[in-house]
């Protein structure tokens, strides 16, 4: 019990770790496509902001009409002239200036002062002034922003372009003089673009033009299921998700409470599962491998489903959850399959944004899988199961569409395809079934049927080496299977176990009565030695089973079909030979253990009854009934069935089944009279 609780706790921790947290309130949606989820209701007031198309239009318009802001630097003209004077002084140290140079310098300074008196702006904006795209600007003056025209504003490139005409009649010579005197390098604008102020005013204008248009009040619909997502809807959804994230991020307590809620939700579902298994499937509860398989299945399918859902829109529907009930009904029974599937479905539903639709569809698929697969005996049955699951999926989906929307016009065909893919993938259950058998030691009905095929190499060798034992095993198989059906035991398991229970006799076939012809080798051996050979067929059988790779449940029949019973014939013979000696029965005792299952008890009874029935002188109802009662009652009195869950009410049913079957087996055919001579 403690190990079961620890495994469930570990599964809970893993599942909570993979539960979506902040992203749990996020949806996958695209503008212009249908809303795939259920109707979304506002949990709080949500401001209606302009949609992306409106914002883009406003931004484009604002970019065209926005008037930039510049900062005037009055001292810049003095800096430019000081820079020129310093450069000219340096040049004069190397060469004496001429009168023409002095005159040109005076004219250049006067021209520059005049240009800066009307402001000089940066070249980038100056070119915009020239092409007419910047007729106005704003200038910061005394901490205020004032508008201004750009009619008289110049810029460095224009100053350089127009200066030669102002300096002299020979413009080519003047241009060359300007270039050689470094005027181009000295010119810098006194109107500089103010990034901070411009951005602030730009954002103010943008916010003014894109102000909140209204409010979606708490309880109102944000968007209906199946509705095409308009640009405004898209903006509203983004606003909703952003506000959800802000609330959760700002309130760490909400995060902790959310995680606590997820942990409690998962723990409660696992508690319900453990309680169900403890009180309604005790065989599963008491089997550690079975519990590990169930909890591991839930965890793996949950994690993969959540990963798929995070990777693609509605990706969780591709996950073939129908595989889980298929595997569980193969190895356990229908109630376990349905309850475990329900727990898995509820766990996944708590992690997605459209739980009701998911629960309905997956529950329908699980029921369809269980209904269509009461007992898996052929691989082709899984194809039928996939078809049933597909029908359940699609019928359920269209029913929900009709119920929610009153039409199927909003059908999401990607969902139809996803559900079809999931149904098709459920056929993978056969591959997983083989892996589970090897990993957990389970045995499916398909495997048992394959083992019961008399063309199996082990059984074929048994029929060749020990024909009498093979016929005995076949008879025991028929006898035990008939009784198993009557008491609702696992008939396929009993049949397979009966066919293999005596394979150890192949090591010494002639020492067993059914294989002897005229010579009995026990006649020359002491009884204790004979007992060791007879008892040895159990250990020899287990060795052969290991070599053949037989499942553990089949090997259990080999070790338990005699339990800890005694080889009585040789034990009694030894006692007669040593009348004055206290004989220890242990050397004559089988290693056991005693039968641990109903099926093993049934095989022990059938094995002894079938062998003893061969020694009856006449096979009447009275003699067969007396034999069956004697053998079975003797085994019960000896305590060989004390560890088996076989009910006493089943014992009488088994006895009656044995008697009817043996009467059929030994029923003598009537003797036909000779034909009359006149008819010959």
Image (cartoon, grey):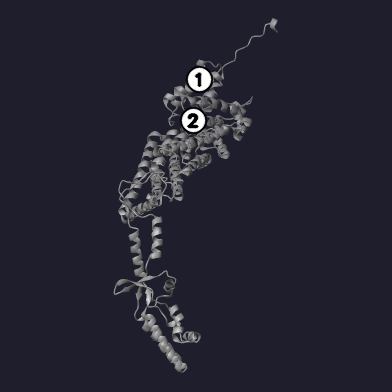
Nearer mark to the viewer, of 2 and 1? 2
Q: Which residue is drawn at 47% across and 37% down?
A: 394
Secondary structure type for disc 2: loop
The residue at which mark 1 appears reads as: 659
Does residue 285 appear in the picture of this structure? no
Does residue 233 appear in the picture of this structure? yes
- Quarter assignment of residue 354: top left
If the image is split into quadrants, where does the N terminus sit?
Answer: top left
Secondary structure type for disc 1: helix
> Which circle's residue, 2 or 1, is located before the other in the chain?
2
At which x and y percent is residue 472?
Answer: 57, 26
Which one is in front, 291 or 479?
A: 291
Up/down of 649 relative to 48, above or below: above
Up/down of 181 relative to 518, above or below: below
Which one is in front, 545 or 426?
A: 426
Residue, far top = 678
At which x and y percent is residue 240?
Answer: 35, 52
Q: Do the residues labelled 2 and 1 touch (CB within 8 Å)?
A: no
| Image disc number at residue 490 | 2
Residue, far front = 169
If the image is split into quadrants, where does the C terminus sit?
Answer: top right
Q: Residue at x 41, y 55 (%)?
A: 53
Question: Horizontally, is 80 left or right of 385 in the view?
Answer: left
| Image disc number at residue 554 | none
Question: Horizontally, is 424 left or right of 140 in the view?
Answer: right
- Quarter assignment of residue 279: top left
At label 2, counting other C-alpha atoms closer than 10 Å, the crowd grade (few under 14, some 14-19, many 20 or more) is: some
At which x and y percent is residue 501?
Answer: 54, 32
At label 1, counting other C-alpha atoms closer than 10 Å, the crowd grade (few under 14, some 14-19, many 20 or more) is: many
At which x and y percent is residue 484?
Answer: 49, 27
């Amino acid at each position: 019990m403690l190990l079961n609780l620890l495994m469930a706790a570990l599964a809970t921790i893993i599942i909570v770790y993979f539960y979506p947290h902040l992203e749990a309130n996020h949806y996958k949606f695209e503008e212009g496509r249908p809303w795939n989820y259920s109707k979304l209701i506002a949990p709080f007031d949500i401001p209606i902001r302009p949609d992306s198309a409106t914002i883009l239009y406003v931004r484009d318009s604002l970019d065209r009409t926005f008037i930039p802001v510049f900062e005037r630097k009055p001292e810049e003209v003095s800096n430019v002239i000081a820079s020129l004077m310093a450069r000219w002084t340096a040049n004069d140290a190397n060469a004496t200036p001429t009168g023409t140079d002095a005159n040109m310098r005076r004219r250049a300074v006067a021209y520059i002062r005049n240009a800066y008196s009307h402001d000089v702006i940066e070249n980038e904006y100056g070119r915009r002034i020239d092409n007419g795209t910047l007729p106005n600007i704003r200038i910061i003056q005394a901490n205020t922003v004032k508008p201004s025209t750009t009619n008289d504003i110049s810029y460095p490139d224009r100053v350089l372009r127009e200066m030669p005409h102002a300096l002299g009649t020979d413009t080519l010579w003047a241009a060359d003089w300007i270039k050689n005197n470094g005027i181009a390098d000295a010119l810098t604008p006194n109107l500089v673009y103010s990034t901070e102020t411009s951005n602030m005013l730009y954002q103010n204008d943008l916010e003014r033009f894109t102000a909140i248009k209204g409010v979606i009040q708490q309880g109102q619909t944000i968007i209906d299921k199946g509705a095409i997502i308009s640009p405004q809807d898209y903006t509203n959804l983004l606003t909703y998700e952003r506000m959800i994230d802000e609330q959760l991020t700002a309130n760490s307590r909400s995060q902790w409470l959310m995680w606590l809620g997820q942990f409690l939700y998962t723990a409660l579902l696992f508690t319900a599962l453990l309680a169900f298994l403890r009180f309604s499937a005790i065989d599963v509860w008491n089997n550690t491998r079975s519990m590990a398989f169930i909890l591991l299945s839930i965890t793996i399918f949950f994690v993969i489903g959540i990963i798929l859902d995070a990777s693609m829109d509605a990706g969780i529907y591709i996950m073939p959850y129908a595989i889980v009930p298929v595997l569980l009904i193969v190895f356990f029974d229908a109630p376990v399959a349905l309850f475990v599937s329900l727990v898995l479905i509820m766990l996944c539903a708590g992690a997605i944004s459209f739980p009701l639709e998911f629960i309905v569809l997956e529950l329908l698929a699980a029921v369809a899988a269980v209904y269509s697969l009461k007992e898996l005996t052929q691989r082709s049955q899984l194809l039928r199961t996939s078809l049933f699951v597909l029908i359940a999926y699609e019928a359920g989906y269209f029913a929900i569409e009709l119920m929610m929307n009153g039409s199927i016009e909003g059908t999401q065909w990607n969902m139809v395809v996803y559900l079809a893919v999931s149904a098709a993938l459920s056929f993978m259950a056969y591959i997983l079934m083989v892996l589970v058998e090897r990993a957990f030691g389970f045995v499916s009905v398909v495997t048992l049927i394959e083992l019961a095929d008399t063309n199996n190499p082990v059984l074929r060798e048994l029929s060749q080496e020990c024909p009498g034992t093979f016929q005995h095993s076949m008879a025991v198989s028929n006898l035990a299977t008939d009784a198993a059906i009557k008491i609702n035991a696992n008939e396929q398991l009993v049949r397979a176990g009966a066919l293999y229970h005596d394979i150890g006799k192949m090591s010494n076939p002639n020492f067993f009565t059914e294989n002897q012809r005229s010579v009995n080798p026990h006649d020359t051996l002491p009884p204790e030695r004979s007992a060791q050979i007879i008892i040895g067929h159990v250990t020899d059988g287990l060795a052969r089973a290991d070599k053949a790779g037989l499942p553990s449940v089949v090997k259990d029949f080999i070790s338990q079909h005699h339990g800890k019973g005694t080889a009585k014939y040789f034990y009694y013979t030894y006692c007669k030979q040593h009348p004055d000696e206290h004989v220890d029965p242990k050397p004559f005792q089988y290693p056991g253990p005693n039968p641990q299952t109903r099926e093993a008890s049934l095989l022990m009874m059938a094995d002894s009854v079938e062998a003893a029935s061969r020694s009856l002188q006449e096979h009447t109802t009275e003699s067969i009934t007396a034999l069956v009662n004697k053998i079975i009652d003797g085994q019960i009195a000896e305590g060989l069935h004390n560890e088996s869950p076989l009910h006493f009410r089943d014992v009488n049913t088994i006895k009656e089944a044995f008697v009817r079957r043996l009467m059929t087996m030994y029923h003598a055919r009537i003797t036909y009279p000779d034909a009359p001579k006149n008819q010959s």
